[in-house]
Image (cartoon, coloured by chain):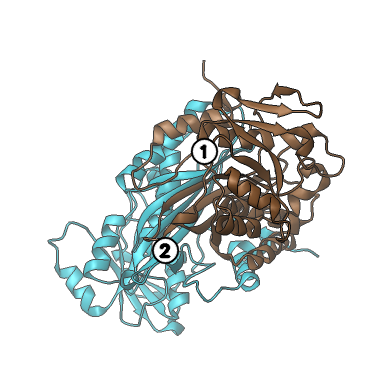
Chain colours: A cyan, B brown
Amino acid sequence: MSKTLSKIGEFGLIDRLKKQIGRSSSVVKGIGDDTAVVPLSSQKYLLLTADMLVEGVHFTTKMPARAIGHKALACSISDIAAMGGIAKYALVSLGVPPSCPVHMILSIYQGMNALAKKFNVSIVGGDTVKNGKIIINVTLIGEVNKNELICRKGASRGDSIFVTGPLGRSLSSGWHARFTPRMAQSQFLVRHYKPSAMIDISDGLAADLGHILDESRVGAILDGPLIPRRPKARLNNALYDGEDFELLFTVSPLQARKLKRSAAHKFTFFCIGEIVDRKKGLQLRVSDGTLTTIHKKGYTHF
Amino acid sequence: MSKTLSKIGEFGLIDRLKKQIGRSSSVVKGIGDDTAVVPLSSQKYLLLTADMLVEGVHFTTKMPARAIGHKALACSISDIAAMGGIAKYALVSLGVPPSCPVHMILSIYQGMNALAKKFNVSIVGGDTVKNGKIIINVTLIGEVNKNELICRKGASRGDSIFVTGPLGRSLSSGWHARFTPRMAQSQFLVRHYKPSAMIDISDGLAADLGHILDESRVGAILDGPLIPRRPKARLNNALYDGEDFELLFTVSPLQARKLKRSAAHKFTFFCIGEIVDRKKGLQLRVSDGTLTTIHKKGYTHF
């Protein structure tokens, strides 16, 4: 009779919540996006994002405690970077077993704090409660100039698709626990190339590109051989593994030409495909040039 | 060798974190307060607060799901009210077992959403992950006019101590799951009586008054017979139970006289004691007039 969460999945739940809660007119982007956008001043928006990490799901206690803290904050900074914004304040809620050694908690915070300092984020508060396993919720508050806000919606037919680094095998390589959020690349891009749409890859390339395609009402062709991969990663790893935390963005043909030409700048951007008509869906071009439709499904939390 | 969290307790941990993380100069109030205060505009501060509620600790699944949602948001609105501010945006992170019925999650959100609407709060996002038990983290973003910000620090010798309603037995009476955050009282007070210090009672009257005394570097005498209590609550319940979510505040002698005289206004405020010199600590006056020193300890999470 009664549906369980595992049956409708994370996105099924989000859809239902979106309908139930609605959106007040003052909210620019609400439930459904990784980051909410609300008014701040005449020139700026406030960006709000939350990430909850659970022991055994997003990290294990075999990982160095500093890496757990690093990851918890880095995920949220990545969300803010994906909107073209900068991060400012963090609230950290920690659920933790009473038997947990204090030095472990302090090390988690050390990992968070070291990253916070690097990105000018102030950890200003939070909550601490007891829970059977370690659970960390980071809420990050950032801001963005109104004319620099980039969303999932905005990609147009003919735009080129880029990614900021190699994909796949993030979990098995340990990348997920040591990555640097692509804030510098994001700031560079919004100032010089104004992407038409952007997202960070957390659920996997296919799934996160899927979010851009759905919201922009377009399709895409990915060029398999052009997708950069981590060592030992196969194409399927790059498409579906998730937790790469690279930026995935689209730019107009004109900006794409400029971006490809300017080998002089300090970042590497990989052109991996093209936005096409919506009815083409998501297709993959393999090395012999043939096209196959691929599914957008990636990591889901249930 | 290695200390556990249960040994140093929540406040021991917060002290260590405060030292480790420090506070950037732009942050007005950071770690250690229930609510962080950061700059927003020339006239306003941004208020940031997070509350994490765990199944079996802060609620049980025997409670109506709507009440769980109500409580999760109400706690945070109460934190914002205690600073003299108003609540604006909420992010809700939910950890939940995959076997959880969808209607239960939707009911939790219904409880939250009904309260959000009443207080003009927009639920703008969050995260959903799997966890063995239900865990809810609400981050609430509010704002306050700079000249209306009220902190724990600020009580002076001679100030009167007030509370907005009866205390004790919040858990056993079910009050903790249906209370209305005292936002209206807070707004009334900051506009007309400018309290010198304020906090909401979550850890218990003695503990939360203790926070005001510590930060204001003063002592207090509580008038036992004047402390309003819930039905069947004893004095000890009123002092130590916690989760009353009434506002506890201090006002100057002049404002106290005005507040006691104006029986005409729509709220009830109970005068329960007086701020005294710091070296007197926290004392309780019982019905025969004798004074005893009482401890400030209240509910701690470990």
Most extreme residue toward the right is B232
Horizontal placement of B237 versus A27: left or right? right
Residue A282 vs residue B269, the one in the foreground? B269
Residue in the foreground of this view, choosing between A214 and A42: A42
Q: Position of residue A22 (x, y in %)?
A: 60, 73
Answer with left or right where residue B221 lies relative to residue A103: right
Question: Which residue type carries mark 2?
Answer: Leu
Q: Is residue A3 visible?
A: yes
Residue B121 location, quadrant: bottom right
Q: Which residue is mark 1?
A: A60
Q: Is residue A248 left or right of residue A211?
A: left
Whole-percent x, y for residue A64 in the image: 43, 33
- Residue A288 appears in the figure: no
Circle 2 crowding by C-alpha within 10 Å: few under 14, some 14–19, many from 20: many
Q: Position of residue B130 (x, y in %)?
A: 61, 51
Q: Which mark is residue A90?
A: none
**Tag 2 subunit:** A
**Residue linked to disc 2:** A46
Residue at x 53%, y 37% (from the top left corner): B156
B40 relative to A158, above or below: above
Q: What secondary structure is marked by label 2? A: strand
